[in-house]
Image (cartoon, rainbow, N blue to C red):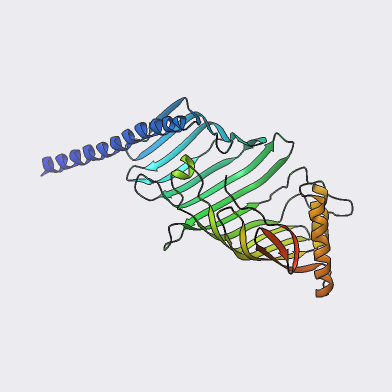
Amino acid sequence: MMRLLTLLVLLAALAWSGFWLLGYGALTTAVPIWFEDRRADGWVAEYDTLSVSGFPSRLDSTLENLTLADPQTGVAWEAPFFNMHALTYRPNHVIAVWPNTQTLAIPGEKLAVTTGDMRASLVLDPGTDLTLNRANLAIESLGVTSSTNWQLAASAVYLAMHRDAEDASTYRVAFKADTLTPPVGFALPDGIDLPRNFASFRADLTTRFDRPWDRTAIEQSRPQPVSLDLTLAEIIWGDLQLHAAGKVSIDASGYPTGEVTIRAVNWRDILEVARHSGQLPVSVIDTVEQALGFVAQLSGKTNELDIPLTFANGATKLGPLPIGPAPRIFLR
């Protein structure tokens, strides 16, 4: 009996070891091929070493000194390492860990990103497409410094993206930033006293894309949103408040059709901050101020307004008043 039990234990250990070696072989084969394919597509795709450890219960992989650059979008990323962790028996549930320093380049500027901790939990559907089922990203002590002389910081950032059970192309997305410090470029106008940090900066929405998020989102192009159902977006900065909710559909060019209602508290000060920041053309701010002044007169409210924004035919209207072009919603 003891010999039989020993034999069974040995067989189980051999089977488990074989299972781990299978995962090890898949990783050490698939990762170099993926980088070679990206280079064949014209990318810069380099790393120094790939190591896999964690025998027998885990598959922990580390890539050292990565560089990825997509020539079509002009986006590039550099990092001293990137870690991925998975249980041997659940290779489709991956924990990704980023380094404390990394560099992200986008057209026109380069961003130096520092974090106290940055990791994500990714659950992928079984199969070679690696379709995203759900993802949760958590960042502690985020700092971003731009080559164009602005900085941004947050004590924590959370992003969740969960696929709808009935529609593989629809995801619920939630975002929250704690103690977010706006860019230094947001110097305040005279007479407006605001705290250094936002009290609230969050959003909750459901988005339907033109296809599910899978490996092609990196290899080829990003899935594009075709509809947005905004449950709530909220920015609170001292006495200034913006709340938004609404639904829009999005055409193939990225222009929305639908209506979003914005509640603005102390809206005149909000416009003054926007004017002082230099991030929007003065003509746009002047047009919005005139339109909101008209709405305020009709409503009899001086500081708080419920503002219906209507998007159609590439234009934005505040009630019946056109105020400018519609924003283009497009993921690079």
Residue closest to the far front: 313
Looking at the picture, does residue 126 appear above or below residue 116? below
Q: Quadrant of residue 22?
A: top left
Quadrant where the image shows the C terminus:
top right
| Residue at (56, 41) in percent of width and height | 117
Let me know if residue 194 appears in the view: no
Quadrant of the drawing holding the N terminus? top left
Nearest the viewer among 318 and 217 is 318
- Residue nearest the viewer, comparing 109 with 18: 109
Residue 128 located left or right of residue 304? left
The mark total stands at 0
Q: Residue 48 placed where, x, y %?
A: 47, 24
Residue closer to the observer: 96 or 55 = 96
Which residue in the rendered view is the most extreme toward the top?
48
- Relative side of 125 to 189, left or right: left
**Residue furthest toward the right?**
191
Can residue 147 be seen here? The reply is yes
Q: Is residue 61 left or right of residue 43?
A: left
Q: Position of residue 155 (x, y in %)?
A: 65, 47
Q: Position of residue 34 (x, y in %)?
A: 41, 34
Q: Identify whether 226 is placed above or below 152.
A: below
